[in-house]
Amino acid sequence: MSSSKRREPYLARYRSAILSRLREIDIFIKTKPAPYSKEDVLAVLDMGEAEFDKISSALGIGCLTPFTLTLIMKNGSGELCGAFRRELECGLTDSYSPEQISYIYNIDLDTVRHAFYDMGVKRLHRGLLETLFSNIYI
């Protein structure tokens, strides 16, 4: 019996760690009136109080609004916050290069290039992210 870990499509991780959390944040912003409570923001961002306090203090955030929530996200250390920050750095776009996907989602560049090659694309439309991620195993 092999003791090595079984590789899974990145799609599962993307859906659970990024996509579902972005949907939760979207619903939160659309349904909760601002200003938000610190406890609600900590819960929706899955962030510790010490990290939140450090970020909000450094940025001079007193009132928690949709804008300040995105500032906190941009500066957070979690997987979702990191992907959010890196996507903003790359610029919001409708299509991605392998290098952008690798950087934004922290996936090995050769692995991403191979998946692009298998799909027969040089740039990937945003709508095909899940297809790409179903071809990337981690």
Image: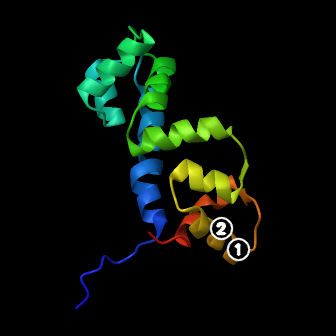
Mark 2 lies on a secondary structure that is helix
Amino acid at circle 2: Arg
Viewer-side residue, 85 vs 20: 85
- Which residue is at 40% across, 14% downward? 58
- Which of the 4 quarters of the picture holds residue 98? bottom right
Q: Residue furthest bottom?
A: 1
Q: CA distance from mark 2 to mark 1?
A: 6 Å
Q: Quadrant of residue 86?
A: top right
Whether residues under marks 2 and 1 lie with C-beta atoms below 8 angstroms apart, the answer is: yes
At 65% from the left edge and 61% from the top edge, which residue is drawn?
Answer: 128
- Residue 130 pos. (x, y %): 57, 62
Residue 137 versus residue 25 in the image, above or below: below
Element carrying mark 1: helix
Q: Can you identify the residue that label 1 sits on?
A: 117
Q: Amino acid at mark 1?
A: Tyr
Q: Is residue 8 left or right of residue 119?
A: left
**Where residue 105 sits: x, y (%)?**
52, 52
Give x and y (percent) for residue 138: 44, 69
